[in-house]
Structure formats: C-alpha cells, structure tokens
Image: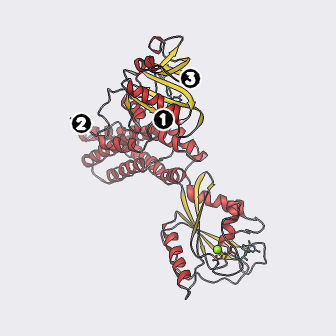
C-alpha cells in the first residue's frame, strides 16, 4: 500500500500544468500528460484535425476554446506514449505567453478532466517509466535552475547519462571483485590472481575518491559560494569588492573603519555564482557599533566557502588581531600593488584595485580554490544526495580492503547498494519523493 501523499499515488491520472515561467512572454506552454491527454486536447483545441486523430510527433495550428469562448490561437503538439517525455500520451498547447491566457487554458484542461500536476510530476513519470534514471532526473532540475555556464554544462552531462555511466563503471569493478571473492570462498585452495581481487578494488576506490572530489565543485557551481573579504581597516577590502564587481557597491574612504555593517553582492566568478561579502576592518575598538561589525566579520569568515585575507602592501605588515578559522579555505592578498611595496610574500597574490593589476590572477585563484581539481570535462556529483551515496560506497569499499573475504563480500554488496541508490535502481520511495519535491510545478 502506498501512502496518500506519496509521489506514487494518482499516477493513472491525467495531469496538467503551465510549463513556462510565470509572467508575460512571447509564447507560453501548457502541458498535459496521461491517458486522457488527447481527449482533453480534442475538447480544447480546434484545428484541421482532432489531436486524438493526429499521429505522435506532429503539431497542429488552430484555436483554443473554452465552451463557446475563443481563448487564443496557438499550436497543439501531439505525442503518443511511449514516445514522449513522460512515456505517456502528451498534448502541449503553445499559446501567447500571458498569465491570463495560460491560466484559462490550464483551467479548461482541468474542467475536461485533468488534475494539477504536483512539483516534478512530469519528470517523476519519466523516471518511473524508465526513461531517465534518478541522477538524470536531478540533472533535469539542474538544467532548469542553471544560472551559470558551469552549472549548465554539468547538468547537461548528467542528463546525457555521463554521471550514471561513471558510477556504473565503478559498479562493474565491484561486481568483478565480488565474483573473485566468491571463487576464493568456494575454492580456497585455487586462489585468484591479484588483478581479479585486489586491483579492481583499488581502482574502484580511486574512482570513488575522484567522484567525491568533484562534489565540492558540483555544489558550489550549482548552489553558489560565499566569499568573505576580511582584513585590517584600510586594507582595501571595499575597493577590491568594487573592482571585482566593476561598479561602486561599497563606500571607500581614506578613513579606517569606513565599513561597519557587512554588505553582500553577487557576481559570477570562474563559472560559479559567488556572493562577495565586504566586512568591517578587524581591530580592537571601543566603538560598540564597529565592534559589532568586527564580530560579524569573524562569523562571516567562519561560515564562508572561501576567505580572502587582505593586507595593505604599502604599509608595514601587521598580524591580524584574530585567528583565522582553521577549516576555512583561505587566499592571501597583498593589496595596493600600484604603490611601493613595504613587504613581500610569495604566498600572497599582489593586487591593485586602483590599476586592476593582479585581478585576472586573483579571479583565477578564486576559481581554482572553489572548484578544486575536479576535471572540467567529466561529470560531477551535483547534489548532496549523490555525494552521500558515493561517500557511503567509498566507506564500504575502504572497509572491504581491510577485511577477510567473507566480510569483504558483505561490504561490497553494501557499496553496490549505495551506488544503485545514486542512479535510483535500488532506492526507497521517500528518497525519490525528496528528489522530486525540489522541482517546480510543470517540470
Ligand atoms: N516544448 C517542449 N520543449 C521541451 C520539452 C518539452 O517537454 N516540451 N522538454 C521536456 O521537458 C525538454 C526536451 N525533452 C524531451 C525529451 C523527450 C521527448 C520525446 O517526445 N521523446 C520521444 C520521441 C522522440 C522522437 O520522436 O524522436 C522518445 O524519446 O521516444 C520530448 C522532449 C526540453 N524542451
Ligand atoms: N593606491 C591604492 N589605494 C587603494 C587601493 N585600494 C584601496 N586604496 C585606498 O585605501 C583606502 C582604504 O580603502 P577601502 O577600500 O575603504 O579599505 P577597507 O579595507 O574597506 O577599509 P575599512 O572599511 O575601513 O575596513 C582608500 O583611501 C582607498 O582609496 C589600491 O589598490 N591602490
Ligand atoms: Mg571597507
């Protein structure tokens, strides 16, 4: 028995939704999927042919009507299951893209027997019909939400099945090892060559470690990264923020203590949606407002994905009055590089907000720090769920490498289960529900 609120209920219903974004656009789409889709289209659309008499893969031009009333003129696309996105019969209405038109078209489909689609229900049906695996379905969501070129490229790779393929390859290695272990258990006196037992396991571990290393890049390129600029007063934090943004977002003055409240601004760096945080200069101060700003700066640095520590290169170097958070990833920047240098540090990047010198190198270093060494051409793990399954698989593989054969076999089976969860071949219903809950209606 499935629960009433489960994603699996009502799957025989015909569903409908506006597929395009809210607001006005040249064209908008209402999509209908399910056994009644073409009958509903017949009740709504008048063209040279009835949609239910039209072969799949065709479109019709005509008028959309609600009872006697003309709603709009538009196109009707006809798909016949299983040759459609969902695998079911699908009718699409492409109309003029106003909320008023789309709203009437949608409510007409509901009057004719469709129900409103739940978030992600079209893609859920594609998944349940076996047209997409779970990682590919997540990539569909990634494509809908992609705000940068990197996020788009990774999602397109995921939808193509490249990520699932990487995972399947690891699965093959584990299956080979399992077979070798089984042979050892059955015929202990015969033994198996290392290339059947130890080598594929080592390879599987390396492949899982590579995959897991991509999770950070996948996360920041889709969800974005927070980058805190910290340093002593007058170090040039606000000037650098403005220089990176290309406009005067933050107030700059020669007075130390200019920035008090923190400020955020968004931009894209190395294909990552980055939120820059300008913070109050770090110093001991009697001023209660400024002191609150300093405390805030420390907290922001602790929670940032990357911290830029700025130091004025034209003044004698002074230690920061706070300890940097140990876990944070940090880049050191020597500012005001257009002025005569008072000190040098090969570990710091020389940058001048005034002349722009060093900014391209800084952007590149930020990109490298955020994306790590994940290979650009390969498919990354792009969701927390995917990273979690790989993390679990890796732990089982590591355990298997230290255990005697019978126990190792058990660990490898667990690792295979974890990987099957990634692609959704072997997955609990609540996990599937959680994936599709993040979708928008109409996808
Ligand atoms: N108008 C429109 N644009 C869209 C979609 C859509 O549903 N409607 N998509 C979705 O959200 C994406 C495209 N995805 C699709 C995937 C498969 C099929 C499909 O009908 N496949 C059949 C037929 C193939 C064929 O005729 O060659 C199949 O694979 O059997 C359609 C769209 C993006 N653009
Ligand atoms: N020559 C030169 N001056 C700079 C550069 N960057 C900042 N300055 C100057 O340094 C002073 C302080 O700059 P801000 O950007 O306000 O410094 P801040 O770190 O934000 O300072 P607080 O907000 O007080 O913590 C200003 O007079 C800037 O014009 C630079 O690259 N070259
Ligand atoms: Mg400032």
Residue 125 relative to residue 263: left or right: left
Give the Cα separation between the discs numbered 2 and 3: 39 Å
Which element is circle 1 on? loop
Write the residue at 45% across / 37% down: 136
Q: Are marks 1 and 2 in contact (CB under 8 Å)?
A: no
Q: Whereabouts is ligand 3, in terms of quadrant?
A: bottom right
The residue that label 3 is drawn on is 74
Q: Which residue position holds label 2?
A: 2
Which callout, 3 or 1, points at the residue further toward the start of the chain? 3
Nearer the observer: mark 2 or 3; the answer is 3
Of labels 1 and 2, earlier in sequence is 2
Q: Quadrant of the N terminus?
A: top left
Q: Which residue is at the front of the view, 176 or 347?
A: 347
User: Residue under circle 1?
Assistant: 161
Q: Position of residue 325 (x, y in %)?
A: 49, 73
Residue at screen point 53% across, 80% down: 322
Which residue, as the protein is rendered here, is positioned at the far left? Answer: 1
Question: Would you say the beta carbon of the disc 2 residue lies within 8 angstroms of ligand 1?
Answer: no
Q: Is residue 349 visible?
A: no
| Corner quadrant of residue 342 | bottom right
* Label 3: few (<14), some (14–19) or many (≥20) C-alpha neighbours in 10 Å: many
Helix, strand or loop at mark 2: loop
């Amino acid at each position: 028995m499935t629960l009433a609120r489960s994603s699996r209920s009502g799957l025989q219903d015909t569903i409908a939704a506006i597929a395009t974004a809210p607001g006005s656009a040249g064209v908008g789409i209402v999509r209908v999927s399910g056994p009644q889709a073409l009958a509903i289209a017949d009740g709504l659309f008048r063209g040279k042919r009835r949609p239910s008499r039209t072969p799949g893969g065709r479109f019709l031009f005509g008028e959309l009507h609600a009872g006697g009333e003309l709603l709009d003129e538009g196109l009707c696309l006809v798909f016949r299951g299983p040759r459609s996105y969902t695998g079911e019969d699908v009718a699409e209405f492409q109309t003029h893209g106003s909320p008023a038109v789309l709203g009437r078209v949608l409510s007409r489909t509901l009057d004719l027997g469709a129900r409103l689609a739940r978030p992600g229900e079209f893609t859920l049906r594609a998944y349940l019909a076996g047209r997409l695996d779970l990682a590919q379905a997540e990539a569909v969501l990634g494509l809908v939400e992609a705000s940068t070129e990197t996020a788009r490229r990774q999602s397109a790779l995921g939808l193509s099945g490249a990520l699932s393929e990487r995972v399947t390859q690891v699965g093959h290695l584990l299956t080979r090892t399992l077979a070798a272990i089984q042979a050892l258990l059955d015929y202990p006196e015969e033994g198996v060559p290392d290339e059947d037992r130890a080598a594929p396991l080592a390879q599987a571990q390396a492949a899982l470690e590579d995959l897991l290393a991509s999770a950070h890049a996948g996360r920041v390129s889709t969800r974005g990264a927070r980058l805190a600029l910290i340093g002593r007063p007058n170090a040039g934090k606000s000037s650098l923020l403005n220089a990176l943004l290309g406009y005067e977002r933050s107030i700059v003055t020669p007075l130390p203590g200019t920035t008090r409240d923190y400020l955020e601004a968004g931009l894209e760096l190395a294909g990552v949606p980055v939120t820059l945080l300008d913070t109050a200069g770090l110093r001991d101060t009697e001023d209660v407002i400024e002191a609150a700003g300093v405390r805030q700066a420390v907290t922001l640095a602790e929670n940032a994905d990357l911290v830029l520590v700025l130091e004025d290169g034209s003044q004698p170097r002074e230690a920061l009055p706070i300890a940097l958070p140990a876990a944070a990833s940090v880049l050191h920047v020597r500012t005001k590089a257009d002025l005569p240098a008072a000190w040098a540090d090969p570990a710091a990047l020389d940058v001048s907000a005034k002349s722009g010198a060093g900014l391209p190198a800084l952007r590149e270093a930020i990109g490298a720090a955020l994306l790590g060494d994940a290979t650009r051409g390969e498919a990354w793990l792009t969701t927390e769920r995917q990273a979690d399954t790989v993390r679990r698989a890796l732990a089982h593989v590591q355990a298997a490498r230290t255990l005697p054969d019978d126990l190792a076999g058990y660990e490898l089976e667990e690792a295979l289960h974890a990987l099957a969860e990634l692609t959704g071949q072997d997955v609990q219903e609540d996990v599937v529900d959680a994936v599709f809950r993040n979708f928008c209606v109409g996808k």
